[in-house]
Image (cartoon, rainbow, N blue to C red):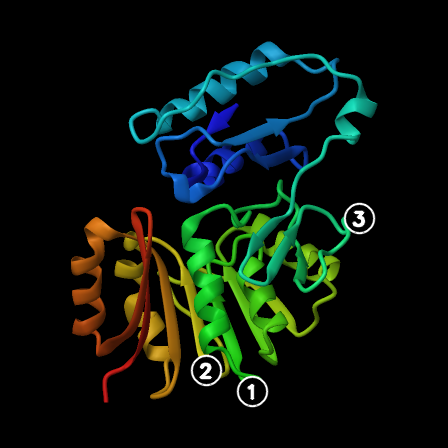
Amino acid sequence: MRVPAEFVEPVVRMFSKFLTNNVYVEQLGDPEDGIEKLNTRVSGFLPKKSNTDKLESNLKSGLSLFSGVFDLSEILIEEINSDVWEKQEFEPIEINDIQILPSKDYSLKEGYIGIVIEPSMAFGTGHHPTTKMCISLIKKYVSNNFNVLDLGCGSGVLGIVSIKYGAKYCLSLDIEEESIKATNQNSIDSNVKNIESKRMDLTQSLDINFIPEMIIGNLNSYLFKEGIKNIENLMGQNTIMIASGVLIENYKEINKLFIDNGLLEIDKQESGDWTALVLQKNA
């Protein structure tokens, strides 16, 4: 089915619920064209003997939850030979000088830094504007001596990028076990070491034994509201926090939340309906 690029990740998550490790994303256009365009295809594969009627019913029920938020095309079900499926091309995604490859079998484009993110594995396919902004801000602010904390790591893409850009260590946290497994596998496939992933709920507590030089939070307004005290407690005076996943319409409210918790905005980016902030403790 086709979906707006901005909302690929929740649809992938819904597909993955029923089609584990057999979900793929194909970009049909540029996400910057706007959310009104159905410019990304989400596809799933299952053996012919499976009960497609039940699967279609389950998917439609799950996807109906999104119908009031964004447009979706109809689900198209067709029979294809396994060799046709295996030969399908899923194009890499280029963000600045990063190339996100859909598998380790792809050749890296000259002049790019390559990472491997399996499209079916958790959140963080690289299509979303918030992911793109995070990557741009990581490149701008990360340094070689940085210990990084990635909150809500999803596929592990941002932690992997931070290491590729020179950070010496990254601890990636997520509440979902699927995300921990995805981060581990994608790190291996991307030939990245010095990443550790743990299951942890940032709204309850953050039990880590170091003060990070950089915190990456590609989250949402609710998680920032519920977890800000725990996040702020981990920050040193020079810690840089990248906070993304905030709708522009919620920017003033969330920025006030940060100010009320002693954090000062030092940089900001916007893309489509989304904004990303860079914060430090207010001296």
Q: Residues within 10 Å of mark 3 (few under 14, many from 20)?
A: few
Of callouts 2 and 1, the N-terminal one: 1
Q: Is residue 6 visible?
A: yes
In this rendered view, identify the residue nearer to me: 172 or 128: 128
The three-letter amino acid code for the residue at tag 3 is: Asp
- Label 1 secondary element: loop
Q: Nearer the viewer, residue 128 or 19?
A: 128
Q: Is residue 244 left or right of residue 265?
A: right
- Measure the C-alpha gap from mark 2 to mark 1: 8 Å
Marks 2 & 1, CB-CB < 8 Å contact:
yes
Residue on which disc 3 sits: 105
The CA span between labels 2 and 3 is 34 Å
User: Front-most of 90 and 210?
Assistant: 90
Q: Is residue 199 visible?
A: no
Amino acid at the residue labelled 2: Glu
Q: Which mark is residue 145?
A: 1
Q: Position of residue 218 (x, y in %)?
A: 41, 58
For label 2, the crowd category at 10 Å Cα-Cα, with few meaning under 14, some 14 to 19 and many 20 or more, is many
Q: How many numbered marks, from 0 up?
A: 3
Q: Which mark is in front, 3 or 1?
A: 3
Which of the two discs, 2 and 3, sits closer to the camera?
A: 3
Toward the top, the furthest residue is 53
Of the numbered discs in the image, which one, if any, rests on residue 65? none
